[in-house]
Image (cartoon, rainbow, N blue to C red):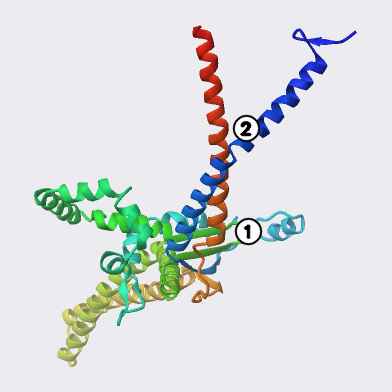
């Protein structure tokens, strides 16, 4: 007795499945010309993209920010290390966490300073800034121009239509904002910052405690110079944040020290002058004035000398708070380009063309079947 499923024998269902697979293979074979054509078209597009994509060179550096603070727990960290537990991040110093470094590199002040990095380019007699290069000298190539005048065409039209009165209004607003010491950028700087953000990357390895700064540029030397400047600028920002409190304290002590030094010298001159003028006077009034001046001098000297000690101590504190960076991998000029990977681009586009070609063949068959069933239902 034959088993049945949904009114059909199992053997018949198996035959139907086999017929379906054969039918799919036949459909694909019949549409092989379409698949081949689409694949060739996409292969040609991939070859075009691979050939005309602009070259990019990548330069990088790896640094380790050394911690100077005493770790919390004393010998507990050593015992924890033996147990496989890392307590290295538990430090009593009030520094900036490395996880916040990307916030520094993406900040407007950092980016604006990086735009002024002098870079060396072929054909230029002297180094020019990043902003000047991409504003006046850079040529994006064939693909860049196609993108600019296709996808970027609306932006170009809006910029062209923008009236001078609107630009003047923006300049007045910028001047007003600058008076309040608020960071502002122009539309051109905004575009350059967006581009720079894509060329600068910061990789933080929290487990091993090192930071990798990488930059991409159309020329090898420029990429190395940009990476070097980004590394130095990042280090300076970190140092400024770290020593900000102790530096402000040093400034305050230095101001008080200057004031008390001046007051001490004035009293010193008054006391010396009084002693010279009353060298042979033994009156009680003279002795009283001498004691008063001597007391004021002693007090001023005590405050002055104490501030001198505090000033020296605070100067040492600033040096102690200044973080030290170890350069594991210094910046070097890249020899080989990092982009474009032409073989990979060609493979991806060819594979994409094959997938789309197969999809078109089956999609066309599916639509034809739907139309036939639709016409039968209407009849």
Figure quadrant of residue 56:
bottom left
Indicate left or right for 132 with 171 as reference. right
Figure quadrant of residue 14:
top right
Residue at the spot of label 1: 88
Residue at the spot of label 2: 27
Indicate left or right for 141 with 60 as reference. left
* Marks 1 & 2, CB-CB < 8 Å contact: no
The mark lying in front, picked from 1 and 2, is 2
- From what the image shows, is residue 76 above or below residue 267? above
Q: Position of residue 21 (x, y in %)?
A: 71, 29
248 or 259: nearer the eye?
248
57 or 294: nearer the eye?
57
Q: Residue at x 59, y 61 (%)?
A: 209
Task: Report, in whole angstroms, how far the alpha carbon at label 1 lies from the one at label 2.
Answer: 63 Å
Q: Residue at x 42, y 74 (%)?
A: 225
Secondary structure of residue under mark 1: loop
Q: Earlier in the sequence, mark 1 or mark 2?
A: 2
Binning the other alpha carbons within 10 Å of mark 2 as few (below 14), some (14 to 19) or many (20 upward) gives some
- From what the image shows, is residue 294 above or below residue 62? below
Q: Position of residue 13 (x, y in %)?
A: 77, 18
Indicate left or right for 188 with 12 as reference. left
- From what the image shows, is residue 266 above or below residue 21? below
Q: Residue furthest right?
A: 1
Q: Residue at x 77, y 55 (%)?
A: 83
Binning the other alpha carbons within 10 Å of mark 1 as few (below 14), some (14 to 19) or many (20 upward) gives some
312 or 370: nearer the eye?
370
Residue 154's mark?
none
Q: Position of residue 342 (x, y in %)?
A: 52, 61
């Amino acid at each position: 007795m034959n088993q049945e499923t949904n009114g059909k024998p199992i053997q018949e269902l198996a035959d139907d499945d086999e017929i379906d697979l054969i039918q799919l293979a036949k459909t694909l074979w019949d549409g092989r010309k379409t698949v081949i054509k689409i694949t060739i078209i996409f292969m040609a597009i991939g070859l075009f993209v691979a050939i005309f994509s602009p070259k990019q060179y990548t330069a990088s550096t790896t640094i380790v920010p050394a911690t100077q603070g005493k770790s919390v727990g004393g010998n507990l960290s050593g015992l924890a290390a033996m147990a496989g537990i890392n307590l290295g991040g538990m430090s009593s110093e009030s520094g900036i966490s490395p996880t916040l470094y990307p916030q520094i590199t993406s900040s407007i002040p950092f980016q604006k300073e990086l735009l002024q990095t002098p870079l060396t380019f072929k054909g230029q007699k002297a180094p020019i800034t990043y902003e000047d290069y991409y504003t006046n000298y850079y040529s994006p190539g064939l693909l860049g121009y196609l993108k600019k005048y296709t996808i970027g065409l609306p932006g170009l039209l809006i910029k062209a239509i923008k009236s001078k009165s609107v630009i003047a209004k923006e300049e007045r607003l910028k001047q007003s904002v600058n008076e309040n010491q608020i960071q502002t950028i122009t539309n051109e700087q905004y575009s350059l910052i967006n581009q720079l953000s894509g060329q600068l990357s910061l990789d933080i390895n929290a487990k091993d405690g090192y930071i990798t700064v990488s930059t991409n540029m159309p020329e090898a030397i420029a990429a190395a110079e940009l990476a070097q400047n980004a590394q130095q600028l990042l280090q300076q920002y970190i140092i400024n944040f770290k020593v900000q409190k102790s530096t402000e304290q040093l400034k305050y002590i230095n101001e008080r020290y200057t004031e008390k030094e001046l007051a001490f010298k004035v009293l010193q001159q008054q006391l010396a002058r009084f002693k010279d003028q009353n060298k042979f006077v033994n009156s009680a009034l003279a002795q009283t004035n001498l004691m008063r001046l001597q007391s004021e001098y002693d007090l001023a000297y005590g405050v002055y000398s104490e501030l001198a000690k505090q000033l020296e101590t605070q100067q040492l504190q600033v040096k102690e708070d200044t973080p030290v960076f170890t350069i594991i991998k210094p910046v070097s000029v890249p020899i080989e380009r990092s982009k474009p990977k032409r073989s990979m681009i060609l493979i991806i586009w060819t594979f994409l063309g094959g997938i789309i070609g197969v999809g078109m063949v089956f999609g066309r068959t599916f639509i034809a079947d739907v139309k036939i069933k639709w016409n039968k239902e209407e009849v």
